[in-house]
Amino acid sequence: MADSIFRKLRDGGEEGELAPALTIEETVVSPFALDVSCYLLANLSSSILAGKSKSEGLVLVTFSRSPSFYLQFLKQKGIVVSSSSKWIRVLDCYTDPLGWIDQPSTGVTEGPSLVKLNKCVSDLKRLFSSVIDAGREMVGDGKTRFSVAIDSVNELLRHSSMPLVSGLLTDLRSHAQVSSLFWSLNTDLHQEKVTNALEYISTMKANLEPFCPSPDGKRNALENLFLAHQDFGKGRFHVRFKLRKGRVRVMSEEYHVDQTGINLSPISSAESVIAATKSLIPKVHFNLQLSEKERVEKEKVVLPFEHQDHGKSTEIYDGRRTLADGKTEATPLSSGELQADVVSSGKGGEIIYFRDSDDEHPDSDEDPDDDLDI
Amino acid sequence: MDRSVNLLDLALGFDEPSPLRGKVVLIEDCVETSGSFVLHQMMKRVLSPHSSDALIFLAFARPFSHYDRVLRKLGCNLSTQKTNNRLVFVDMLMMKCSDGDDNVSGVAKLFREIQGTVRKLGNVTNRNITVMVDDMSLLEIAATNSNSDHVLDFLHYCHTLTCESNCSLVTLNHEDIYSSMERPAYLLQMVCLADIVIKAEPLASGLANDVHGQLTVVNKGMISSKSGKGSSRNKLQNFQFRIKENVRYAAKTCVCALWHMDEAIDASLTWSKHCFSSLKLVYSTVGPSIVS
């Protein structure tokens, strides 16, 4: 499924259409958007170098990590980036986004170079121009296209308003030479309207959530971080595609983050149910769970009035006739036989039991006397 | 002096060399349970005689004399470390707040000073530099006219030092100050920025005579761009502690003695001894009734 996202970014959009855009959403409990971004970055870079992508270059705009971090990451993946590389440009909005560091610079490093420093991230028009200029340095002014990757829009949203950020992303999508675009966002840091606005702009939305998401949302995001014990680093990866005809397709996978990065796999329902169940059990100092042996032994327990006729259905007479019995009259109890809707084995003095609700869990919290009509 | 690695050290990876290199550590505490002892413990580890690491300490909460007294009890002489250029103590209490409209220049200037100091201290080979801030809420008040955005900008720039110079950044923040709905984004920003989050909180069951609180350490880990190895990714550990005088850490199931001179006793040494014995007396009489 992550490959589906990568293919859409690699193939880009049709001519005359807006570029496909991906929002990668993370939370405080599942802060792994960077891992997803790195995964896509590595794959896109490989496809560009192999000539299998519609875009011939990649502009990486860094806000949350230094350019050297990404260059080192690509090197670990076998993609060596040097100053003479013509397929990638990095716009550094991380090192000095507000111009605090005294350097003899006019704001954006001039001249062709692999990494360009941007010292004024609040000026989005200038940022847009810088991205386009960096792309054109690689692919020229013609019809050749390039992809744009923004590692995080959280910093952008801190320094600029939502409409301006939306405008920047829309302008990038609308540009004829931008093939595809993706960015990441931490939904816990922003209001819901910001998340929704960015989702409207994007054609794909990927979000990471733990196995057992809390219904309290961002209000208890901090508490949820500390409650997510062994499930930290694992969860569900959901992707929503907006298709051209208007249909929406949702796909899900499981993710697991380790030292090598993020690993995606199909959903294993049994494991996720067990994991979810384990997460719901409160953390106390005594055991609330059944071991496997205890569970097996519990299932073997023969309940009274059940399982008396093996293989046969059991019913309990409740004193009322059924329609099927028709003319059959109930005989006095002294006769020693039960009739009506009772399946009788022919023997006297038998108790036949109907469980009230077969699908009710044995230890349900529901009060069995709730349905009494007294 | 006990030099063995305790539970907190293990959780932070102090059984390996330079575990916090290039990492951001956030310590969260509350009124009921102060996290200052975690800060002091980390100071002691950074200024260990077995390494040449350096510490830049931004003190907004207490004067140098307090930390000196506390760390002496832990076996670390801060005055000597200052003389040896291993400790740069920036007493923000003595610095005047910047008045006027240009509050951004105050934090920007502070960062430039820190950056310059890091570059000077970094001339020694194999030296790891740690920047500690005690605490972030007072930084917000003192330096930037209560604008959390400027504090976040400052944190962002300090984060660049972790990449540029492989520094460690350790901050202390009070979670309950920002517990209202209008401010959680500020706390969450700090949590998102941190690689390791240490939360000091009281026990869920309330006050106890033997256990004074619990520590939860979340090590989010990062893809290490230098070595290619991400050590101990995504670990969460929880254990309890008991504070008496010096610091030792308690496993969850057994109660060991911790000795730590808390910041509540910060006048003179004589007065502190008197206070401590009084506290012990009070605690021994009041404690059992609280527990019951």
Image (cartoon, helix red, strand yellow):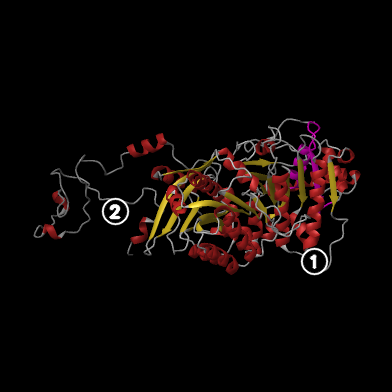
Query: Which residue is label 1 attached to?
Result: B102
Image vertical order of residue A278 relative to residue B178, above or below = above
Q: Chain of mark 1?
A: B
> Residue B153: percent from the left, percent from the top?
71, 58
> Would residue A342 be counted in the magenta stretch?
no
- 1 or 2: mark nearer the eye: 1
Q: Chain of mark 2?
A: A
Query: Which residue is label 2 attached to?
Result: A356
In which quadrant of the rendered view does residue A300 lie?
A: top left
> Residue A16: percent from the left, percent from the top?
44, 64
Q: Are marks 1 and 2 on the same chain?
A: no
**Mark 2 nearby-residue class (10 Å; few <14, some 14–19, many ≥20):** few
Left or right side of A305 for B130: right
**Amino acid tagged 2:** Asp
Left or right side of A191 for B187: right
Left or right side of A361 for B40: right
Of A179 and A201, nearer the camera is A179
**Mark 1 nearby-residue class (10 Å; few <14, some 14–19, many ≥20):** few
Magenta stretch bounds? B35-62
Query: Please, what secondary structure does the residue beneath circle 2 have?
Result: loop
Image vertical order of residue A220 relative to residue B209, above or below = below
Q: Quadrant of the N terminus of chain B?
A: top right
Image vertical order of residue A215 relative to residue B284, above or below = below
> Residue B140: percent from the left, percent from the top?
75, 60
